[in-house]
Image: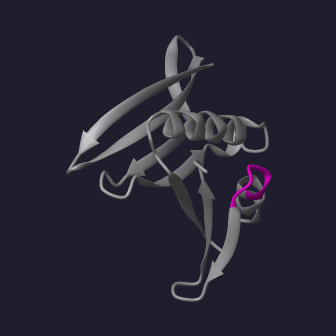
Amino acid sequence: MRVARRAVGMGGGWELSLIALVEEDGRERCVGLAECNVDPVTLLGEVSVLISDEWQGTGLGLNMLRLLLKLAKESGVTEVYGRVSLDNPRMVRLFKALGFRVRLSMENGEYRASLRLVD
């Protein structure tokens, strides 16, 4: 497996992306995606992670998110947050394991996890 990374400017903001690829039958297939969309004014980043079903529970999401947070911090992002559906307790545990503060948002019925990257 290899992880490809990219930083892309988009609409005034910018994005950090990590893509996990595996080779099957001589072709690469994406099994994981982690992204951080950054507001250039506030330096606040929204993170998201998507892992294919067969790779969930293997630590891939945790490791991709760790690397994404490291890259975000190195890029000057001051804080990150993620939104989590109420029916996704695995993602809530993942965010908590990485030190995120997780709260229930009464506004839209989802969890909001946040982590300050600088002191």
- Percent of width and height locating residue 74: 50, 33
In this view, which residue lies farthest toward the top? 26
Q: Is residue 87 visible?
A: no
- Percent of width and height locating residue 105: 59, 82
Quick one: quadrant of the N terminus? top right
- Percent of width and height locating residue 84: 61, 67
Left/right placement of residue 46 relative to residue 103 reads left
44 within the magenta span: no
Left/right placement of residue 22 relative to residue 44 reads right
Q: Is residue 83 above or below residue 47?
A: below
- Name the residue located 57 percent from the left edge and 17 percent from the top edge: 23
In this view, which residue lies farthest toward the front? 119
Q: Is residue 28 above or below residue 84?
A: above
Q: Is residue 98 above or below residue 81?
A: above
Residue 89 picture quarter: bottom right
- Name the residue located 59 percent from the left edge and 35 percent from the top edge: 70
Front one among 27 and 45: 45
Left/right placement of residue 106 relative to residue 4 reads right
User: What secondary structure characterizes most of the magenta part?
Assistant: loop
In this view, which residue lies farthest toward the left? 11
- Name the residue located 46 percent from the left edge and 27 percent from the top edge: 5
Left/right placement of residue 83 relative to residue 87 reads left
Q: Is residue 52 visible?
A: yes
Magenta stretch bounds: 96-100
Front one among 117 and 16: 117
Q: Is residue 24 above or below residue 52?
A: above
**Color scheme of the displayed model:** one colour
**Figure disc tally:** 0
